[in-house]
C-alpha cells in the first residue's frame, strides 16, 4: 500500500502535533516510504529471536 500525502500529513500531525504544508509533506513522503521499507526489511530478518540460538563468529585470536 503506497502512502498518500493525506496519510503522511495525518502521521506528522499525530507525531509532531503540528500541521505541515503540502510542499513539506510532498518532500517528506519519499523519505518516510524509504524508512518504512527499511523497517520491513529488518522485520524480515527476524532479529528478535533468542540470542542463545543465534550463530556468532568465534574470534580464535582471543582464546589462550
Image (cartoon, grey):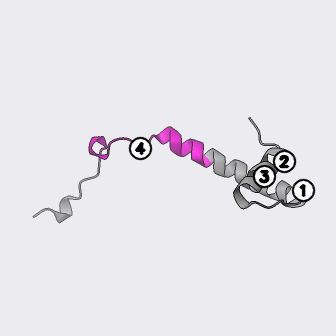
Is there a contact, CB below 8 Å, between mark 2 and mark 3? yes
Which residue position is annotated with label 1?
22
Which residue position is annotated with label 4?
48
- Viewer-closest of 12 and 36: 12
Q: Earlier in the sequence, mark 3 or mark 1?
A: 1
Q: Which mark is residue 29?
A: 3
Q: Earlier in the sequence, mark 2 or mark 3?
A: 2
Give the Cα distance between marks 1 and 2. Answer: 8 Å
Q: Is residue 61 left or right of residue 50?
A: left
Crowding around mark 3 (Cα neighbors within 10 Å: few <14, some 14 to 19, many 20+) is some
Crowding around mark 2 (Cα neighbors within 10 Å: few <14, some 14 to 19, many 20+) is some
Q: Residue at x 19, y 63 (%)?
A: 61
Q: Is residue 31 left or right of residue 59?
A: right
Q: Quadrant of residue 18?
A: bottom right
Q: Is residue 1 left or right of residue 5?
A: left
Q: Residue at x 71, y 48 (%)?
A: 33
Give the Cα distance between marks 4 and 1. Answer: 37 Å
Image coords of residue 41 (percent x, y): 56, 43
Q: Residue at x 90, y 56 (%)?
A: 22
Q: Secondary structure under badge 2?
A: helix
Farthest-out residue, left: 64
Magenta stretch bounds: 38-55
Q: Is residue 40 above or below residue 63?
A: above
Amino acid at each position: 500500500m503506497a502512502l498518500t500525502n493525506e496519510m503522511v500529513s495525518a502521521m506528522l500531525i499525530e507525531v509532531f502535533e503540528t500541521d505541515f504544508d503540502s510542499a513539506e509533506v510532498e518532500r517528506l513522503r519519499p523519505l518516510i516510504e524509504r524508512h518504512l521499507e527499511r523497517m520491513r526489511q529488518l522485520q524480515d530478518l527476524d532479529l528478535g529471536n533468542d540470542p542463545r540460538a543465534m550463530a556468532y563468529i568465534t574470534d580464535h585470536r582471543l582464546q589462550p
